[in-house]
Image (cartoon, rainbow, N blue to C red):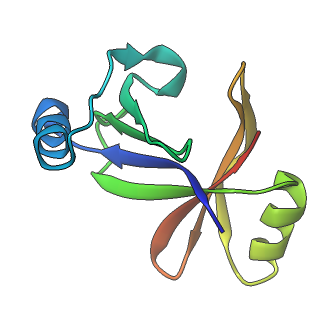
C-alpha cells in the first residue's frame, strides 16, 4: 500500500503549509487549479501532499489519503462490497490520473490510479 496523494482541507492553508515546511524542511508550491487550488509538495518517494481550502461552504476540514491502485474500478468495487459509500466516482484529472472518494468506517478515503 502506498499513499499517492494526501489531501488536507483546511481553513488556514498557509499556516498548515508553513507548519510542514518548518518542521520537515519541505516547500509547497503555488495553487494547482487541477487539484482544487491545493498548494502541493512532492516528497522524495514521489507521493504528494496537497493543502487546500474547502471548495464548498459545507465542506469540513479533513485529511484524506488517496491510495495508489492499479485498477481504480476494481478497487472501488472491492471497497463497495465491504460497505463503502461512493462519494465521488472515478474522475480523470488531465495529466495526473484518476481519483475516487469513498466513505467507510466513518472516515473518508481516496483511490488514485496513474
Q: Is residue 57 placed above or below 72 in the rendered structure?
A: above
* Residue closer to the observer: 57 or 70: 70
77 sits left or right of 24 in the view:
right
Closer to us: 90 or 5 = 5
Does residue 85 lie above or below 32 as drawn?
Answer: below
Classify residue 32 by image quadrant.
top left
83 or 76: nearer the viewer: 76
| Residue 37 % position (x, y) | 39, 22
**Image coordinates for residue 69, horizontal then vertical, percent:** 77, 57
Q: Residue at x 47, y 42 (%)?
A: 44
Quadrant location of the C terminus? top right
Q: Percent from the top left, x then y, of residue 63?
A: 36, 57
Along the horizontal axis of the image, is 99 left or right of 90? Answer: left
Quick check: 58 above or below 55?
below
Image quarter where the N terminus lies is bottom right
Is 99 rendered above or below residue 55? below
Residue 25, picture quadrant: top left
Toward which corner of the image does residue 46 lie, by quadrant? top right
At x 33%, y 20%, the residue is 29
User: Could you tell me which residue is drawn at 73 percent across and 36 percent down?
Assistant: 91
Amino acid at each position: 500500500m502506498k499513499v499517492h496523494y494526501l489531501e488536507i482541507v483546511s481553513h488556514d492553508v498557509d499556516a498548515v503549509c508553513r507548519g510542514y515546511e518548518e518542521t520537515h524542511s519541505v516547500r509547497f508550491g503555488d495553487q494547482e487549479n487541477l487539484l482544487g487550488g491545493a498548494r502541493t509538495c512532492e516528497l522524495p518517494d514521489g507521493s504528494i501532499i496537497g493543502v487546500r481550502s474547502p471548495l464548498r461552504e459545507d465542506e469540513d476540514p479533513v485529511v484524506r489519503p488517496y491510495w495508489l491502485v492499479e485498477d481504480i474500478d476494481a478497487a472501488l468495487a472491492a471497497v463497495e462490497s465491504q460497505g463503502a459509500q461512493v462519494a465521488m466516482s472515478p474522475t480523470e484529472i488531465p495529466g495526473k490520473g484518476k481519483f475516487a472518494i469513498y466513505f467507510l468506517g466513518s472516515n473518508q478515503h481516496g483511490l488514485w490510479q496513474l
